[in-house]
Image (cartoon, rainbow, N blue to C red):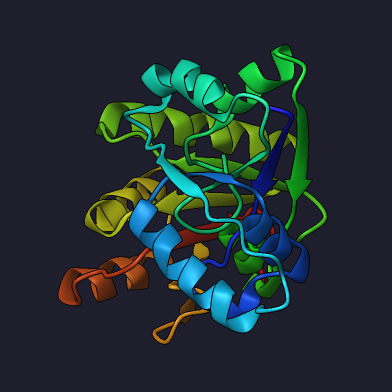
Amino acid sequence: MRNLYVVATPIGNLQDITIRAAKTLLEVPFVIAESTSKAGILFDFLKKEFPKFKYSHKQIISFTEDEEEIKIASIFQKVDVNDAALISEAGTPLISDPGFKLVREAIKGGVQVTPIPGPSSTVAALSVSGLPTNKFLFLGYLPKKDGKRSEVLENLKKTQAIMSTTAIILESPHRLVDGLVSIKKIFGDINIVIARELTKIHEEIRREKVSESIRYFEKNIPRGEFVILFSTKSF
């Protein structure tokens, strides 16, 4: 592999693709993708919207979290002396998505790793949250087990007592209520921001007490992907 481009792709609205990202993805011969089906939809859009860019008939290589460990060697062998791009299902690769080990091995092997920046649900949510943005702490997804989840949040509380910072947490729909209950247990009935389905048709940003969020999502089945934000400072 000569060059590995880590390319951010839209988190929902395909028009959020950057010109540089579109050009890179259309021209590289290999694309390493967390979701081949999502990649196919993206390429259909890119070929239509950017006809002036040279389209390289490419191979899209599946690279899910379960496959990451076993596929790295075969990817380097397959790509050989060609350029490749790494994309996640949506947003900026590696942010709570597979790819860290691949990038690490590429660097060890002397491959030029280049970021092609763009959409990120965490930064997008932070920018419209109304919470302090000068410092933030990204925790990714909370642990599934209640005890471990509480331990992580207790440590976060200690950190926020020392350094005032906005916390950013990702959560899936089936674990959202459990996560909110744990936050209330550790931090009390604080103000939080929940961003759902950013840039999509059903985009929603809720700013309320965590108890209100719990009641709402207990009555309304959570759908989509969620970003939870809160700060030790009031707003």
The image quadrant that residue 186 belongs to is: top left
Work out whether residue 136 or residue 86 is closer to the camera in this orientation and state it.
86
Q: Is residue 92 above or below residue 150?
A: below
Work out whether residue 101 or residue 49 is closer to the camera in this orientation and state it.
49
In the image: residue 78, left or right of residue 185: right
Query: In what quadrant of the picture does the C terminus appear?
Result: bottom right
- Toward the right, the furthest residue is 134
- Toward the top, the furthest residue is 108
In the image: residue 175, left or right of residue 44: left
Residue 112 seen in this snapshot: yes
In the image: residue 109, left or right of residue 171: right
Query: In what quadrant of the picture does the N terminus appear?
Result: top right
Residue drawn 50% across the image and 67% down it: 43
Residue 187: image location, x then y, percent: 47, 48
- Number of marks: 0
Residue drawn 33% across the image and 49% down it: 179
Q: Is residue 49 above or below residue 138?
A: below
Residue drawn 78% across the image and 49% down it: 135
Residue 211: image location, x then y, percent: 34, 66
Work out whether residue 41 or residue 55 is closer to the camera in this orientation and state it.
55
Residue 195 seen in this snapshot: no
Residue 68: image location, x then y, percent: 42, 26
Residue 127: image location, x then y, percent: 70, 69
